Amino acid sequence: MIASISGKITRKGLDHLVVEASGLGYKVFVVNDILTGHNIDEDVKLVTQLIVREDSQTLYGFLKEGELEMFNMLLGVSGVGPKAALAILNAGKVEELRMNIGSGDSAMLTTVSGIGKKTAERIVLDLKSKVGEIVGNAGTSDSEDLIKALTGLGYNMYEVRQIISQVPTNIPTQIRIKEALKLLSK
């Protein structure tokens, strides 16, 4: 098992990097943040998951252990393969994904290409209890109310997720909505 890889990026593809380590070039499939955040001839260290299939051995790489953990949790859901799990991780930050799953919201997952409503609901059902403890207070009803109010006003989930952490939590929901609207109008 290859648990991590550290080396120089020698090539970049649409969904992968080639990392040279000890004279060998490893093709590592990664999320878009890694592709855009790193350049050729730059050193990189990734935690990895090797997926062995009958006809292939594929390496997936992540910058943080939390991303790898979420990737493996997604793989445990029936109907979710490595490419779909990587696409889900491309849809948003791991913390946001955990918050959505923990609060039972499958809407973000259905925006991912190849993930339909049934698969999204299965992911939420299978992983809600696993991420629930990690989510903690992030999935409180105040946050859910704020998200529902803003998406109801026509803002997309991506915009809402970008500003939600900037809105104070110790104020009434109506005032939180006003504060969020100010942030969204900037």
Image (cartoon, rainbow, N blue to C red):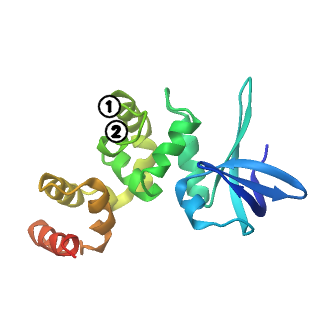
Image quadrant containing the N terminus: top right
How packed is label 2: few (under 14 Cα within 10 Å), some, or many (20 or more)?
A: some
Q: Which mark is residue 65?
A: none
Q: Quadrant of residue 92?
A: bottom left
**Mark closer to the chain start, 1 or 2:** 2
User: Mark 1 and mark 2: span between their CA atoms?
Assistant: 6 Å
Give residue 185's position: percent from left, percent from top: 18, 72
Residue located farthest toward the left when viewing the structure as drawn: 174
| Residue drawn at (33%, 60%) of the image | 138
Residue 91 shown left or right of residue 148 in the figure: right
SS of the residue under disc 2: helix
Name the image quarter holding the C terminus: bottom left
Name the residue located 75 percent from the left edge and 50 percent from the top edge: 3
- Tell me which amino acid carries mark 2: Thr
* Residue 88 image position (x, y, % from top left): 46, 44
- Left or right for 63, reference 163: right
Tag 1: Cα neighbours inside 10 Å, few (<14), some, or many (≥20)? some
Q: Is residue 67 above or below residue 58?
A: below
Q: Position of residue 81 (x, y in %)?
A: 55, 32
**The furthest residue to the top:** 54
Which SS class for mark 1? helix
Query: What's the mark number on residue 110?
Result: 2
The residue sitting at 34% across, 49% down in the picture is 100
The answer to whether mark 1 and mark 2 are in CB contact below 8 A is: yes
**Residue 117: numbered disc:** 1
Three-letter amino acid code of the residue under disc 1: Lys
Q: In which quarter of the image is residue 107?
A: top left
Residue situated in front as seen by the camera: 45 or 73 = 45
Q: In this view, does 119 lie to the left or right of 172?
A: right
